[in-house]
DNA sequence: CTATTATTCAATGGTATTATTGAATTATAG
DNA sequence: CTATAATTCAATAATACCATTGAATAATAG
């Protein structure tokens, strides 16, 4: 009973398709839980131990461990043992691209996301925002001070080349360290992260001219813009793509 | 009890994050079922009625309808009523990009997909394959005959500019219609579709020099390469991006 | 209006996921 | 070797999802 000209029956084709889509769905399943998406989002900043991940995503250790296991089985994250700790990281840059694609699709299609963000991030409307291309240009012209307001650890794991680390929590006490007069652009983890918003607000309150970068560090790095790794506050930009 | 310098409590931030990731997970959930992924894949070829979708994906009507409803609630597909039928289509090109990203992530990360495809598509190894850029060049040089071996309906809904429609089922009986002497490149629905493989095999058996395009029509169209819509076999290439 | 076709809705068991708990590993320190 | 810390595993109950069935709705034809 062949309807196709070649040596495969319809039944075999159906079995092939079923297996193929089942495999793709394994990845889809991994994206089906809010907690796992949040873990992916945290991991986009760099590798983290189970404990750090659990705390960052407000999960119990055991729960975080299980979700990480699910992500690992879908091969979206990899792990590495160091002493008594296990560190997880994204499996590849493609995984971040997938997460980005999911975000932008959802953003474009779900009005609810608009509603959630505008009620919470309403002040963002009034803030000036800078796109990545504009920032790159102004960085090249040395026209601007770029501020990484994420926790220092995340800055060390990778930051925009030329950016200064000034974690949000220390911003108010260390304002004097900022070169005076220059415009400031703050950035943080991603488009939905509020650190940069709060930094801009604080800076404005102290009479500084500040705006926020519309994307976060992982997006910047993924699009191949210049980044740096390590402690150096860095006026020596190194280039490294994704 | 504020730990942040601005006017939002940690609790409010957590609620914001929870709601945000819950919304993203709504899209993720929609990608968690093999059947829904297959429906998306079919819809990437063009809009379809519930009945067509059910038959193509080997589902009962009621089941297909429910899965389509789930996709619709995630805003990944849109629908349109025409008489007594309801036609579904992808919500936007971004949805296809998401599906592509899921596929390529899964392909890169899941060795199982390799195993499934190589056991079923083993003959593909021995076949010549042409990439999209090479095909575009050779189309411009009019060096080649491009064959769309999908069902005629799908050709009508959109095809590679300059391609001839010759559904796989009719290939053997209509071989004479093919311009003699020229090399042939066949394509079908996507990288995992077997129509083109079978066409190449049939053509080779009849002494024709044939190879397959490594991607399918939706991928071609999504990357902005020239396409055409309608019945015309078309030597008048129209351009339409995604 | 009635019959027919296409689709959706609602209810049903069956199955799979989820968060929690507490025990079991794995590695380090003493 | 023992104690401790970090993580994973295993078992559990609550929940959510799934495919099927049959009834309900929408649109068309007669």
Image: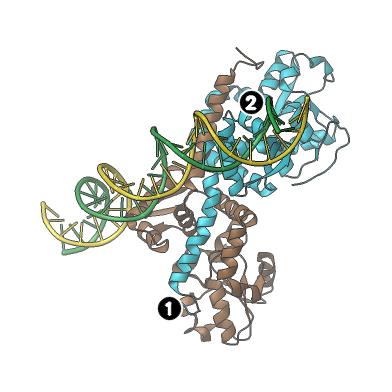
Chain colours: A brown, B cyan, C green, D yellow
The quarter holding residue A222 reads bottom right
* Chain to which the residue tagged by mark 2 belongs: B
The quarter holding residue A241 reads bottom right
| Cβ–Cβ under 8 Å for marks 1 and 2 | no
Q: Position of residue A208 (x, y in %)?
A: 60, 84
Q: How crowded is mark 2: few (under 14 residues within 10 Å), some or many (20 or more)?
A: some
* Chain to which the residue tagged by mark 1 belongs: B
| Local SS, label 2 | loop
| Local SS, label 1 | loop
Find disc 2 in the rendering and name its residue.
B194
Q: Quadrant of the N terminus of chain B?
A: bottom left
**Residue at 58% over, 17% down:** A9
Q: Where is residue D21 in the image (x, y as percent from the top left)?
A: 50, 28
A221 relative to A22, above or below: below
A159 relative to A26, above or below: below
Which label sits on residue A105?
A: none
Q: Position of residue A36 (x, y in %)?
A: 45, 53
Find disc 1 in the rendering and name its residue.
B2
Residue A191 visible to the viewer: no
Q: Residues within 10 Å of mark 1 (few under 14, many from 20)?
A: few
Residue B204 visible to the viewer: yes
Lower sequence index among marks 1 and 2: 1
**Residue at 59% over, 83% down:** A204
Q: Nearer the viewer, mark 1 or mark 2?
A: 1
- Residue A86 placement, left or right of A16: left
B29 relative to A175, above or below: above
């Amino acid at each position: 009973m062949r309807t196709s000209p070649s040596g495969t029956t319809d039944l075999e084709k159906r079995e092939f398709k079923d297996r193929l889509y089942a495999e793709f769905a394994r990845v889809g399943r991994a994206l089906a839980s809010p907690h796992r998406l949040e873990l992916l989002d945290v991991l986009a900043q760099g590798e983290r131990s189970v404990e750090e991940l659990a705390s960052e995503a407000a999960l119990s250790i055991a729960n975080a461990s299980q979700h990480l296991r699910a992500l690992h089985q879908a091969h979206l994250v990899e792990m590495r043992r160091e002493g008594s700790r296990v560190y997880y990281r994204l499996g590849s840059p493609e995984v971040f691209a997938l997460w980005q694609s999911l975000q932008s699709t959802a953003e474009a299609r779900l009005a609810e996301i608009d509603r959630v963000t505008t009620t919470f991030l309403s002040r963002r409307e009034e803030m000036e925002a800078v796109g990545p291309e504009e920032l790159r240009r102004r960085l090249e012209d040395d026209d601007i001070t770029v501020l990484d307001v994420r926790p220092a650890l995340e800055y060390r794991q990778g930051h925009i080349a030329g950016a200064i680390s000034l974690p949000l929590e220390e911003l108010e006490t260390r304002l004097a360290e900022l070169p005076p007069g220059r415009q400031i652009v703050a950035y943080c983890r991603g488009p939905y992260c509020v650190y940069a918003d709060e930094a801009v607000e604080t800076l404005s309150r102290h009479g500084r001219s500040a705006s926020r970068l519309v994307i976060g560090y992982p997006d910047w790095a993924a699009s191949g813009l210049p980044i740096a790794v390590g402690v150096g506050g860095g006026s020596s930009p190194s280039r490294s793509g994704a």
